[in-house]
């Protein structure tokens, strides 16, 4: 029963003076982050696929047990025109993490417009092939995917389902604790209903979970952890370092209520 708690991204300017000490050089941020968390999602790859040298230097800033999940490029999830090229380029850039045995899988976050259709299920299957031997975790935003047939399909394809916490708005997915592979996955986006549809990446995720909201998730998480070999729990409510505060709070909750230690 292994679980890893971290945040979606780590290099945010508004974390300075909140999580990072004032004046900390940008190149030292990941080292500081790794003193508090055992894993991180790299989200910047959604916008640009970096040279492999970038991951070479990132890998050297963390301890050997540290783990990386990397978001697929927007070509894979949003544009969907040159997926083969995008996945090949991203995999090549990740070679330093792969060689260090610290890469733990791709995260594909699909938009609300990506609905449950035969064509889109075929696209998912092809993306699974392009991910090769590496885990592929898929996050849906459209509730048409919330049905038993989806989970059966993901299990058959060997794709991990991403459980989410997000605003209780029509068309979105509810809180769940579903695992379709031996590795479970949860992402906390916050519950900012006002800015969800029209907001920016800053305003949409601007939300601070109350202690009671985190507590209500603990039983669901414990069940997920118990039935999986490993569980990833990431917080995406990054503005002003709220993801850090909530992730650390969730660590304490799970340690206290479940008697589990993050490994």
Image (cartoon, rainbow, N blue to C red):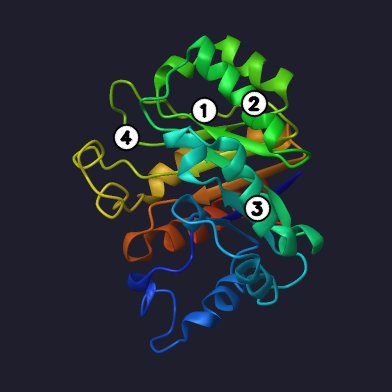
Query: Dot 4 lies on which element?
Result: loop
Q: Is residue 91 left or right of residue 211?
A: right
Who comes first in sequence, dot 3 or dot 4? 3
Whether 254 is drawn above or below 172: the answer is below
Check whether the beta carbons of the residues at disc 4 and disc 2 lie within 8 A of each other: no
Residue at screen point 36% across, 45% down: 190
Spatial CA span between label 2 and label 1:
26 Å
Q: Nearer the viewer, mark 3 or mark 2?
A: 2
35 and 198: which is toward the camera: 198
Question: Which residue bears the numbered disc 3?
Answer: 4
In which quadrant is the N terminus drawn?
top right
User: Separation of disc 1 and disc 4 at Cα?
Assistant: 13 Å
In the image, what residue occupies the spot 43% across and 15% down? 144
Q: Which residue is mark 1?
A: 176
Q: Quadrant of residue 213?
A: top left
Residue 175 drawn above or below residue 47: above
Lower sequence index among marks 1 and 4? 4
- Local packing at callout 1 (Cα closer than 10 Å; few below 14, some 14-19, many 20+) is some
**Where is mark 2, residue-wise?**
126
On the image, the x and y values in percent for residue 227 come to: 73, 31
Label number found at residue 167: 4
Sequence-earlier tag: 1 or 3: 3
Name the foreground residue: 259 vs 141.
Answer: 141
Which structural element holds mark 3? strand
């Amino acid at each position: 029963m292994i679980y890893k708690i971290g945040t979606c991204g780590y290099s945010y300017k508004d974390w300075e003076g909140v999580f990072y000490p004032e004046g900390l050089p940008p190149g030292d941020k990941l080292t500081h982050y790794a003193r508090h968390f055992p894993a991180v999602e790299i989200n910047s790859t959604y916008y640009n696929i970096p040279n492999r040298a970038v991951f070479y230097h990132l890998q050297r800033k963390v301890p050997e047990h540290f783990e990386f999940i990397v978001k697929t490029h927007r070509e894979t999830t949003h544009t969907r025109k040159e997926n083969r090229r995008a996945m090949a380029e991203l995999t090549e850039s990740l070679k330093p993490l792969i060689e260090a045995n610290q890469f733990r899988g791709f995260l594909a976050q699909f938009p609300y417009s990506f609905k449950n259709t035969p064509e889109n299920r075929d696209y998912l299957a092809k993306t699974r092939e392009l991910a090769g031997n590496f885990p592929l975790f898929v996050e849906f935003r459209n509730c048409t995917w919330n049905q038993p047939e989806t989970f059966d399909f993901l299990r058959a394809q060997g794709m991990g389902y991403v459980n989410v916490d997000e605003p209780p708005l029509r068309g979105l997915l509810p809180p769940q604790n579903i695992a379709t592979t031996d590795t479970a996955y949860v992402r906390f986006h916050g519950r900012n209903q006002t800015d969800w549809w029209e907001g920016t990446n800053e305003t949409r995720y601007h939300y601070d979970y109350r202690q009671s909201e985190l507590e209500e998730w603990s039983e669901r998480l414990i069940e997920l952890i118990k039935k999986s070999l490993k569980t990833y729990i990431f917080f995406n409510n990054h503005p002003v370092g709220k993801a850090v505060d909530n992730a650390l709070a969730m660590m304490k909750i799970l340690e206290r209520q479940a008697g589990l230690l993050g490994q």
